Image (tube, rainbow, N blue to C red):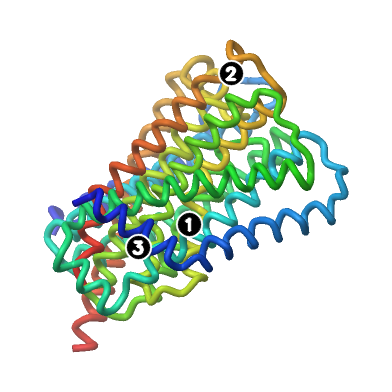
Amino acid sequence: MIKKHWYKITAVLLILYTLVWGLLNRVPRLDILNETIRNVYYHVPIWFAMLFMMTVSMIHSIQSLSKNSVKHDTKAYNAAVVGFFFSIPGLTTGSFWAKYTWGTWWTFQDPKLNGVAISILIYLAYFILRASIDDELKKARIAAVYNIFAYVMMNVFIMILPRLTDSLHPGNGGNPAFSKYDLNDAMRFVFYPAVIGWVLMSYWLFQIKNRISELNELYHE
Amino acid sequence: MIQSLIKKEFLLEFRQKSTIGGVLVYVIGTIFVSALCFKGRLDKPTWNALFWVISLFTSVTISGKSFLKETGGQALFNYLHYSARDFIVAKIAYNMVFMLFLSLMTFFFYGFFIKDEVENLALFLLILLLASSGLAGILSLMSAIASKANGNFAIMSILSFPVLMPLILVVIRLSKQAVDGIEWAGVSYDLLAVLAALNVLTLALSFLLFPYLWRD
């Protein structure tokens, strides 16, 4: 039993630890950021979890094409749904952080924010495309093609473009990255566990979604 | 094989002169409406943005049909006679020429009816070339997907606009430099490289992925 559930237990423990210790530990005193720097423990790992899920989705799409299987396509869809779900807390935490540091909930000046908005549109388009095709095998192939293409375009948008243009985010457009000046050891001890915790959590949600769709399939047969 | 496919596309296009005529009327109509709305009160950034918005909408509308005629018996014939890779390469090549023609036309009429703000013309034409080949690559694949998904127009624009955004944003930023007349030394070659890389990336992805859309 523990073999099957170890990652769920780890996820819960790690997230609990980061939720509590993230609020209690000592953080560097920085201008403008002040206490909001603790958001690093929540905002960033949630985006990592989303990117992880989108990658899982893309890999399943590739497998769905190469093995011509509907099962992998369902998994790709489930992963995309979970990733999409993670974009909501990712946006909310980011929006609050922006309000208290940049003074606004949302700004079009930042290529990362634009990238996220576009990624959300891309995955909505993916869901709509899937919904508009009835035949299972055809749906699996066409949705997989779009998913792979969309994943590449999304990465161009959120990985490459922000590095070329001015961004308010750290590590982009001349702003120093976190690791350079403030992610000190104390913060590392919360940040890395938080990343692992949220990634495992997303994987857990993914497994639950998979089981639901398997049961649905059984039920409809 | 590829040459004959490209030739076929051109023949089909010229046989139905209504398509080219329709495209020209569409472009001129859009530009004329914008000209009447703005009445020449356009500063450079707006001029630039409006130009690319018009190009974007025209190319999505026009290339939406690129695979729509390949349905039913025609699709079966293509499937039996041509290889998927030849077919998509021919389609993209044809669309590239067509898009380039389209954007040159747009540029001409836009300059004629509204005004010509471009100061570094060579750079602008280079951007026009790269942008239209990128648009052709992305839109050919999207049109193939849309034609399989019951081929309605709404699906085409829903699928295309988000994936076109990286290309369009890079293009708008670059063409702003051409409009402002920045010298060649000051042009941001990073963005130009990204634009070229996007072209290569799209072509490679279409080449790899299209065979899976091909069989029904």
Figure disc tally? 3
Asked if the residue under mark 3 is in contact with the one under mark 1, i.e. CB atoms within 8 Å, the reply is no
Looking at the image, which is closer to me, B1 or B65? B1
The residue that label 3 is drawn on is B144
Label 3 neighbour load within 10 Å: few <14, some 14-19, many 20+:
many
| SS for dot 2 | loop
Amino acid carrying label 1: it is Ser
| SS for dot 3 | helix
The residue that label 2 is drawn on is B187
Could you tell which of marks 1 and 3 lies nearer the N-terminus? 3
The correct choice, above or below, for B83 with respect to B122 in the image is below
Quadrant in which the C terminus of chain B is drawn: bottom left
Looking at the image, which is closer to me, B34 or A15? B34
Subunit of label 1: B
Give coordinates of residue A71: x percent, y percent: 19, 68
| SS for dot 1 | helix
- Please state if B8 lies on the left or on the right of B57 as rendered: left
Q: Residue at x 41, y 40 (%)?
A: A155
Quadrant of residue A77 within the rendered picture:
bottom left
Quadrant of residue B71 within the rendered picture:
bottom left
Subunit of label 2: B
The correct choice, above or below, for B89 with respect to B188 in the image is below
CA gap, disc 1 and disc 2:
28 Å
Give coordinates of residue B33: x percent, y percent: 77, 59
Give coordinates of residue A200: x percent, y percent: 30, 48
Amino acid carrying label 3: it is Ala
Amino acid carrying label 2: it is Val
Subunit of label 3: B
The residue that label 1 is drawn on is B160
Asked if the residue under mark 2 is in contact with the one under mark 1, i.e. CB atoms within 8 Å, the reply is no
